[in-house]
Image (tube, rainbow, N blue to C red):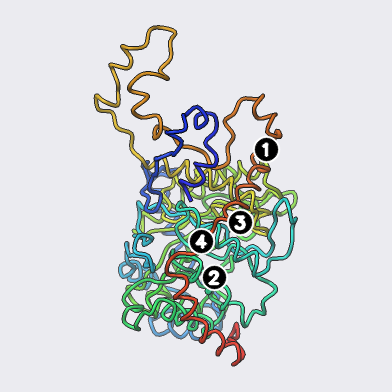
Amino acid sequence: MQTETRSRRGGGRQRRQDAATQTVSRQPNYRQLRHPFQPQSVFSEDEVQAIHDTALRVIEELGIKVLLPEAREIFASAGARIDDEMVFIGRDIVEAALKSAPASFRLCSVNPAREQTYENGAMLFMGAGGCPNATDFERGRRPGDLASYIEAIKLIQSFDVLHMFGFPVEPQDVPVHLRHYGLLHAQLTLGDKPVNINSRGRAQVEQGFEMIQIAHSLSGDDFAGGVWASTVINSNSPRMFDRPMAQGLIDFARAGQMVIITPFCLAGAMAPVTVAGALTLQHAEAMAGIALSQLARAGAPISYGGFSSNVDMKSGAPAFGTPEHIKMQIGSGQLARLIGLPWRSSAGAASNTADMQAATENNMGLWGACMANATLIIHAAGWLEGGLSFGYEKFINDVEALQIMAEMCITPVADAAEIGFEALKDVQPGGNFFATQHTMDRYRDAFYAPVVADLQNFGAWEETGSQTSAARATGVWKQVLADFEAPPTGAEAAGNLAPFIEQKTKEGGAPILD
């Protein structure tokens, strides 16, 4: 996709090349990225430790409400105090959990070239997730359906800078007890990246694990020996885990699959109004989830996570890309490093359309997560309306930002050849470097070629329709979908899955709650 897109959108530089040199040969590898910059800090070491210690007090003295009896029994067996649905978790339990939780593990894929090492220092991007609507400039805003979900999966598969699948669109036209079949079928047949399963009841989770094994002809030992699936577990801030989330956490831990524990602490609403207060609540809820996972199975792969931001105090609506959002991201990174675990953050936008506001919000959230050295950045492409819509044009413009960020992972060289003294000597004052040998040897590969940005001058831009980047993005996503080809593993996976899905559908699917 990278090379094809650049061939289509070479801009003025491409047109200046003669017919014999039209092909752009630059093909950077965006598949496995490492953070290029050192993590930043907003708190002193003493302040980070104070947040951590206060979070331990919260779960030990104030407690966490846990609605799933099985989860309360697990906590009780480890020595936690139980009072009805409230669980009071001693710091000794948390400290033991932090010791057993792995700091690094491998995310498996049917395509080994797509596998990822999940650890601090790695930089992974995931597209938008959980959007009940889809929107684009041609078809407008509409309730999410399976067709839109499939299109979104194809878009995510087409760009190497997106490393994992999620659930970009909620297909509301498929009954909930059957929905997981369509969700996983698309990921397993149209893509070859690490997959994601929603935690919507034990039966659906177990069937999801089975579908991965069937699709890729994995034995039980093959599946148990690797991390083949992930799930996002959201606590109900403040201080509560509901039944499906607690159950999903247990089920994934016991199966050795990755849990991304994610409190959603909006300062001023579900969390204290201060950055430090919101992070204290986030940290407490995350550590409670980490403890439950490790009690269910010591050594289970788990990701610390945070999706904390603030609300607009006039309307109560969530806000993203704000100064407070960025400070919470950086603070989250400090807390994750304190406890020694890889972690997730999020970008996102509150804007209702793919405009300047949307780009600013998403890009500021992206930079905040990168300054914080987040292992995984979710909602990095396509997230609109605070998560209520997956935007096709927004997705394309976000991919541009992600690829630019990925380019920062390529370290420039400063040897004698690259410094180019001879080129500097060749060009007289007031001249240009277009025709120097130094330029001619490098011009095909020298610079990033954009996916959607237009680098023409005003006259050329006006002649081609005076389109904004959002308008141009419509043509890009349409072409990507028109050119899409499933990976070589897709046909076999589809054939393997067909009998299973047919049989389970006849049997009535799987309920959300057991």
Q: Which of marks 4 and 1 is in front?
A: 4
Q: How far apart are marks 3 and 4 (CA)?
A: 40 Å
Q: Residue 34: x percent and y percent?
A: 36, 49
Residue type for callout 2: Ala
- In the rendered structure, are the residues bearing label 1 and label 2 in contact, judged by CB atoms less than 8 Å apart? no
Q: Which of 186 and 462 is in front in this view?
A: 462
Which of discs 2 and 3 lies nearer the camera? The answer is: 2
The secondary element bearing badge 4 is classed as: loop
- Residue picked out by circle 1: 468
> Real-space Cα distance between discs 4 and 1?
28 Å
Which residue position is annotated with label 4?
A: 485
> In this picture, is 251 found above or below 325?
below
Query: Counting other residues with Cα less than 10 Å from the Cα at mark 1, is it few (<14), some (14-19), or many (20 or more)?
Result: few
Please report whichever mark, 3 or 4, sits nearer to the chain's N-terminal start. Answer: 3
Regarding residue 57, the answer to whether it shows in the image is no
Identify the secondary structure beneath mark 2: helix
Tell me which amino acid carries mark 1: Thr
Q: What element carries label 1?
A: loop
Residue at 52% across, 30% down: 15
Label 2: few (<14), some or many (≥20) within 10 Å? some
Q: Distance between the residues labelled 3 and 1?
A: 33 Å
Task: Determine whether 368 is above or below 76 in the image.
Answer: above
| Residue type at the position of mark 3 | Leu
Task: Name the residue furthest bottom.
Answer: 507
Look at discs 3 and 1 and give the one toward the viewer: 1
Mark 2 = which residue?
A: 186
Q: Please identify the quadrant where the C terminus is shown.
A: bottom right
Marking on residue 266? 3
